[in-house]
Amino acid sequence: MKEQLENIKELAIGDFLNAKTQQDVETLRIKYLGKKGALTAILKQMGSLSAEERPKFGQLANEVRDLISGTIEKRITELKKEELQQKLGSEKIDVTIPGKRHHLGHKHPLSKILDEVIDIFIGQGFKVVNGPEVETDYYNFEALNMPKEHPARDTQDTFYIDENTLLRTQTSSVQIRTMEKEAPPIRIISPGKVYRMDEVDATHSPVFNQVEGLVVDKGITFSDLKGTLESFIAALYGKEAVVRFRPHHFPYTEPSAELDIQCFSCHGKGCRICKGEGWIELLGCGMVHPKVLENCNIDPEIYSGFAFGVGLERIAMRRYKIDDMRLLYENDMRFLKQF
């Protein structure tokens, strides 16, 4: 039995020193030291030894067990170091290699124009006010001097949710809400999305963006309106830009006007871009109708004001010489990268 112990010791130490992984070590541990292992099988035979031989055999068996256990711990420590070195080698980062370039995006042309418009009007003392896109009929039409059955409603095909709720057709509703809450002087712009049942084509969309402005104070005249808009156009398109005010009609302003800008391409001579007219319609404006002021509990005998509204897409198309509004919404990177 002593020879068997020596034989097990030599075989076990050789096997453990040649083990390639920690799993191999565990398999060998069970083979030699497990409940059905080789060393355990030898120990079960101690009952056949004499009383004098048992202590000596037991001492030798314990020495073999301790030697095997020590070899196991040593090999596991070695394998852990080897695995760590392999992992560090495979996951090593070369900090001298140039990093991958991250492509940064940029603002959409409509966002760029909106930021510019806001900056211009803030510089003139305006503040930005927002309002709900789902509106009531009162704020979208009635308070703006367009009661039910008013013919002006026919020019704005509207998305109705129910009889008195709709998607706003203009941001003028924000002006009404502001005049109800704030006492003059008032000087605001209200940018945002508006909705009309227009067919999609090169110049129309059922969803587009507006920027409307409102000023209410004592002694406001049409000259203030002209000066404000001329300064706006000069800041947006340059001091060489030429504008004209053409009489028009809006139910919520009186008098009313359209502001046209001289065609940048032909300088008033007439071309394809301006359809031979020499001028391009840009925005609508006028003095706030007294009835609108009364609807907001503002005395028209004391206060007066002006309002204007411009389509953001129209400004962007003029600025970037875009001839199809749909390009602004299609998210074609080949188009957007130009800006």
Image: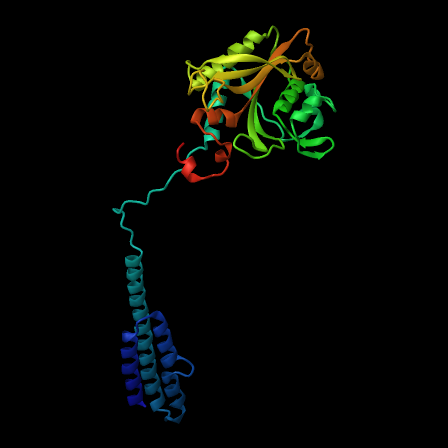
Residue visible at 51% across and 28% down in the picture: 313
Compared across the picture, whether 176 is left or right of 284 comes to: right
Compared across the picture, whether 89 is left or right of 107 comes to: left
How far from the left and from the top, in percent, is residue 106?
Answer: 42, 34
| Camera-side residue of 10 and 305 | 305
| Camera-side residue of 148 and 136 | 148
Of all residues, the one furthest to the left in this rendering is 96
How far from the left and from the top, in percent, is residue 188?
Answer: 57, 18
Vertical position of residue 26 compared to residue 163: above or below: below
Residue visible at 49% across and 13% down in the picture: 243
Vertical position of residue 298 compared to residue 58: above or below: above
How far from the left and from the top, in percent, is residue 48?
Answer: 39, 94
How far from the left and from the top, in percent, is residue 37?
Answer: 39, 83
Q: On the rendered image, what quadrant is the C terminus found in?
A: top left
Q: On the rendered image, what quadrant is the N terminus found in?
A: bottom left
Compared across the picture, whether 98 is left or right of 146 comes to: left
